[in-house]
Amino acid sequence: LACVRIGGVKNLNGFSCIGRKMVKDRRSIQQTQSRILDLTSTLSVIGFFYHNPSWFNPWNLSTHSWLLGGVLIRGAIAFYDHLVIFLIEKLSGAPLLPTRTVTNKPVRYVTLDTKSIVFLFINSIHEWIFVQRLCHYLWHSPNVSKEASDIGCINTVVALYVMFVILDVCYAPLHHILHMPAIYPLIHKHHHRQHYPTRGYLDAGNEHPIEHIIGVCAVWGAVMGALYVTGAHAVTIFVFFNVHAALAMLNHSPYDVRWNVVGLNYSVANHEMHHRKFTVNYAQYCMWYDIWMRTYADYEGPKKEDESGGKVRNRSSLEMEERKKKIT
C-alpha cells in the first residue's frame, strides 16, 4: 500500500481505516472462536453428566441434600474469605501494597459484569463437586492414611512442602500456555480484566471455567504426587487445601503479604505484577519456573516526584535486590 499525497501532505486516513477494519475483523473472529469453545465445552459437560452422573455426586446425596450442601459450601467459602482478610488486617499488620496507597493517582478497579457473575456461578458448582470428590477420596482411598498414630514428619511437614512445589510445577507452565496469543483471548483474558485485584475470592474465582478446571487439576496433581512421594496423611491434604485456598484469596487482595520458606517464595506483590504486566510471574509459590524461563519480574511500586522534579520509586532498589537474592 502507498500513501496518497494531497497537496504535498501524506493522507493516512486510508491506513487508519484499514487498521480499524483489521482490529474489528480480529475481534469478530475471536468472538466466534470463543462462542464455539464455550458451546463445545458446555455440550461436553452435559454429555459427561448424562453418561456419568455419579461423578458429580460421589456421596450419592439426594437432590435436596446436594443443593443444600452447595449452599452451605458457598457460605463457608464466603466466611473463610472474610476471615482471612480479617486476620490479615487485625492480627498480622500487613500493609497495603504501595500501588494502593497513592492518593493522587488511584488504581482503576473493574466491576463484576454479567459474564463474571456467570463464571463465578459455574465455578462455584465445580468447587462443590471438587470438595465432594476430594473428601470422598480421602475417606475411602486405601492409599490415604487417616489414623492419628500414622502422623509423622514425612507425611505432614515434608508432604505439605512437596504439595506446594508440585502444584507450581504443574500450574506455572499451564498458566504460561494460557497466555499464548492464540489461547489467551479465548480463556485467560477474562481473569485479567482486573489489573489490581482487591476482592479476594471474587477476583480469584472470576475466571473462565476451563481455566478453573486446569487449576483444580493442578491441585489434584499436587495431592497425588505428595501421596506417591511421601504418603501424605489425610490431615496434611486437608491443611494444604485450606492454606492454598487462603493464599489464592490473598493473592487477589490489596495486602502486601509475603513469606519465604526454603525456596517457597509467596508474595502478593508478585501476583499483582502478573496482573499488571501479563507476561511475568506465572508461578504462585515457587518462582523457579519464572527464573528459569526469565519471566520473573521484581515488584514495581508507584512512582513519585522527588525534590528535583525527577521520578523515583517508592521502594529502594536495594530492597528489590535483596528480595531477588532470597528467591534464588
Image: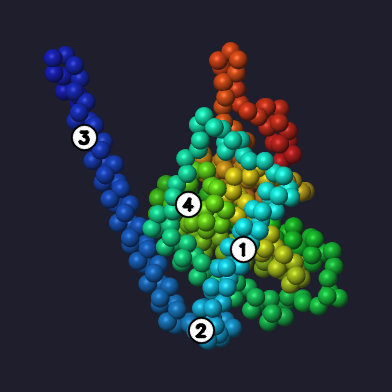
Q: CA distance from mark 4 to mark 3?
A: 31 Å
Say which amino acid is labelled 4.
His
Looking at the picture, does residue 4 appear above or below residue 153?
above
Where residue 99 appears, x then y in whole percent? 57, 36
**Which tag is nearer the camera, tag 1 or tag 3?**
1
Name the outermost residue toward the front: 90
Number of marks present in the image shown: 4
- For marks 4 and 2, the one nearer the N-term is 2
The residue sitting at the left extreme is: 7
* Residue 254 x, y percent position in the rendering: 59, 45
Quick one: SS at disc 1? helix
State the image coordinates of residue 47 (x, y, percent, origin top left).
40, 77
**Which of 278/101 is in front?**
101
The numbered dot on residue 17 is 3
**Residue visible at 74% across and 61% down in the picture:** 160
Q: Nearer the viewer, mark 4 or mark 1?
A: 1
Q: Determine which residue is flagged by label 2.
A: 64
Q: Residues within 10 Å of mark 2 (few under 14, many from 20)?
A: few
Q: Residues within 10 Å of mark 3 (few under 14, many from 20)?
A: few
Cβ atoms at labels 4 and 1 below 8 Å apart: no
120 relative position to 135: left or right: left
Mark 4 or mark 3, earlier in chain: 3
